[in-house]
């Protein structure tokens, strides 16, 4: 049996930064997804794939996973769902037949063209909770936390 001593300060989950970030992120993603789920029949993972391919056409599923911070299984399911809905096309990579390059179909591009302004409007509305200075600070803080996590990941 290991040491079962209690930590001196209990973990107050509601004040624990990773938990708080996760909660606010899930709430924001859920609220945004309600804007496009009914209208376009897609969920959060599908929207993220569309958003990434709308900006960076021709990526592989692994590259989409890297850019989205979603796991490969989630991306694979989202890609299959989008392909089934005719929103995404897959083309075999000439250099590696095991890989596919993903692009939005014409229908997928139309969905992206409609959803992107909705998402940006949602973001603008969300940021009204902050002053302009706070919004800039938040952006910097997020960049710094990501840089710290890059260093942590590199140290593994």
Image (cartoon, rainbow, N blue to C red):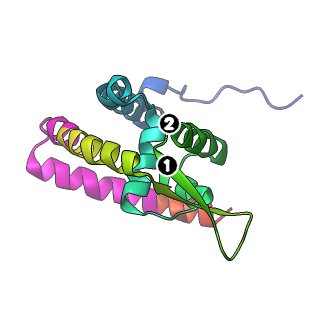
CB-based contact (under 8 Å), mark 2 and mark 1:
yes
Q: Does the magenta run of residues contain 128?
A: yes
**Label 2 SS:** loop
The quadrant in which residue 155 appears is bottom right
Q: Does the magenta run of residues contain 59?
A: no
Residue 108 sits above or below residue 154 on the image = above
Give how far across and how far down residue 71 sits, in percent: 61, 46
Give how far across and how far down residue 98 sits, in percent: 74, 63
**Label 1 SS:** strand
Residue 83 sits above or below residue 96 on the image = above
- View extreme (right): residue: 1
Q: Which residue is mark 1?
A: 88
Residue located at (44% from left, 63% from top): 57
Magenta extent: 122-147
Label drawn at residue 85: 2
Q: Quadrant of the C terminus?
A: bottom right
Front-most of 29 and 42?
A: 42
């Amino acid at each position: 049996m290991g040491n079962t001593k209690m930590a001196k300060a209990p973990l107050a989950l509601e004040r624990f930064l990773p938990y708080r970030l996760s909660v606010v992120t899930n709430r924001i993603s859920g609220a945004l997804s309600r804007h496009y789920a009914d209208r376009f029949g897609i969920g959060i993972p599908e929207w993220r794939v569309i958003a990434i391919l709308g900006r960076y056409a021709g990526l592989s599923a692994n590259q989409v996973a890297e850019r989205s911070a979603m796991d490969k299984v989630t991306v694979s399911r989202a890609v299959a769902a989008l392909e089934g809905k005719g929103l995404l096309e897959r083309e075999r990579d000439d250099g590696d037949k095991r890989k596919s390059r993903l692009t939005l179909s014409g229908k997928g591009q139309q969905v992206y063209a409609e959803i992107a302004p909705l998402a940006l409007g949602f973001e603008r509305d969300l940021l009204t909770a902050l002053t302009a200075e706070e919004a800039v600070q938040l952006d910097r803080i997020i960049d710094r936390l990501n840089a710290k996590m890059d260093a942590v990941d590199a140290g593994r």
